[in-house]
Image: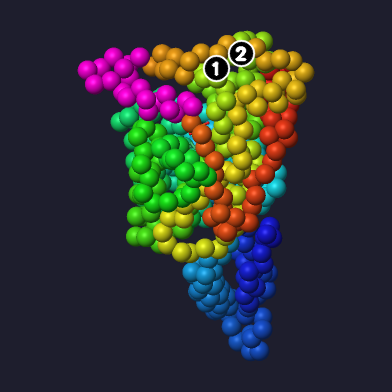
Amino acid sequence: MTFFNLLIAHRYILIIAFGNEFILIPLIIDPASNVSNVNKYNNHQRFLYVIQKIKSDLCLISDTLKIIQEQGFKSVKVLITGAAGFVASHIIEYINRYNNEIEIIGIDNLSYGYKERLEGLSLEFIQGDVEDIEKYNIRDVSAIIHTAAIAPLPHNEINPTESYKQNVVNTIRVAEFASKIGCKKIIFLSTSAIYENDIKFPSKEREHLNTTLVYPTTKMCAEHALNAYSNSYSLSTYALRLFNLYGPRQDYFREQPPLIGYLLRSIFNNEIAELYSNGEQSRDYIYIDDLAKVIINLLNKQDNKKGLKVLNVGSGLTTSVNEIIDILSKISGNEIRINRNSSEKFWDNYSSLFDRDLPLNKDYINKEVNKYSKSDNTILHELTGINCNTSMEEGLKKCYDFAKKYFNK
Ligand SMILES: NC(=O)c1ccc[n+]([C@@H]2O[C@H](COP(=O)([O-])OP(=O)(O)OC[C@H]3O[C@@H](n4cnc5c(N)ncnc54)[C@H](O)[C@@H]3O)[C@@H](O)[C@H]2O)c1
């Protein structure tokens, strides 16, 4: 991608584009000087003549800009919601490093994110809520990467109304906003948790999915809403059904940290890791850089087809909890200390789900702890040609090195 483009040199004005911004440079030429009988004009007439010439050039320029807009001039300003989250902050770092012609605006209300994740990164950061997206006077973005959501499963179960508001209604707000400001592309981070009741693997992106838990159900609803918007307003939309992501900047401290973040914290704080189940359950893990490549590929796609394009983003391979523990133990040179509990105990911290006249079905959520997942990547390959094949050894080493610096060891 070129950093700036000389778009057109009119007779007296030069236009240069930086991404979506245009600069008009008046050329220091007196238009009246080419007129043969110039001496006939007095100063006032000369002045009017120059103004008239510039006015006619401005009309030409405005026509040119209109054509550029209609033909979809490649803009390079991207809005990322949930910017201070694990995934978004990493995507921003990746874009800064490999695609620095892309300008980034990031929004985050810091409900789950940390501002320190954005230290040293280049972006315009808005500390605010997606709910207020229309108030921040954001314009000229060519794509929105919508990552903001309530992601931890138990938080979604405990407060479903808030969860639907954050994960579904705010996605609709993003789509509304996109259609109002003429932003044609939305990349929405959905989840493979949608496959919670699958019995055939690898999981494929088929239409009628049967979800039971709140988190995957909200993501399904959001996908449906995006599909409707995509058709109604000619938006190009993608839903990435992400399998288990891991990488540097993963949360180490939230109430229920993701497995790898939690194990790294246990290593560096010398704590015993409390695990639920025997550790033999396997899932599809994907290293965060692999997702970043997929997102850059989709940002660059000139694709004006309506309708939501749904794609799995996984490695297509599975790794068990015990294998992850072994790899991390080898990398750290120490045995990780583990205390194993039964999977039901995982939910002991969330008693409000069971202290009801009609308690939550325990089978559903126990199944979640022991869930197996594996991605079918046929659509991912067809659409992007990308293989998410960073090995667990390589990915976990990068996580370990990052955490080592983070915990100052
Ligand atoms: N991490 C994974 O393994 C994984 C797997 C599947 C799907 N996903 C999806 O990817 C997305 C990002 O996940 P993550 O792991 O980075 O989660 P995260 O919690 O680290 O990041 C989400 C960010 O969104 C922000 N946010 C939440 N509600 C907001 C609001 N109303 N306004 C502004 N900001 C708001 C939070 O403060 C947080 O920084 C989520 O949509 C999640 O559902 C993640």
Instruction: Tell me what residue is drawn at x 50 percent, y 43 percent.
Output: 201
Picture layout, residue 82 above or below residue 12: above
Query: 327 or 63, which lies in front?
Result: 327
Find the magenta span and give its range. 351-370
Picture layout, residue 351 above or below residue 251: above
**Could you say whether the residue bearing mark 1 is in a helix, strand or loop?**
strand
Instruction: Tell me what residue is drawn at x 46 percent, y 31 percent.
Output: 151
Picture layout, residue 95 above or below residue 1: above
**Residue at which label 2 appears:** 338
View extreme (left): residue: 357
Image x and y of residue 225, in percent: 35, 49
Neighbourhood count class around disc 2 (C-alpha, 10 Å): few under 14, some 14–19, many 20 upward: some
Q: Confirm whether residue 140 shows in the render.
A: no
Question: Residue 288 appears in which quarter of the rendering?
Answer: top right
- Horizontal side of 222 relative to 321 (left or right) equals left
Image x and y of residue 38, in percent: 64, 85
View extreme (front): residue: 200
**Residue at which label 1 appears:** 275
Q: Quadrant of the N terminus?
A: bottom right
Real-space Cα distance between discs 1 and 2?
Answer: 7 Å
Q: Amino acid at mark 2?
A: Ile
- Horizontal side of 78 relative to 154 (left or right) equals right
Q: Amino acid at mark 1?
A: Leu
Ligand 1 is within 8 Å of the C-beta of the residue at disc 1: no
Query: 235 or 306, which lies in front?
Result: 306
Q: Confirm whether residue 294 shows in the render.
A: yes
Query: 182 or 252, which lies in front?
Result: 252
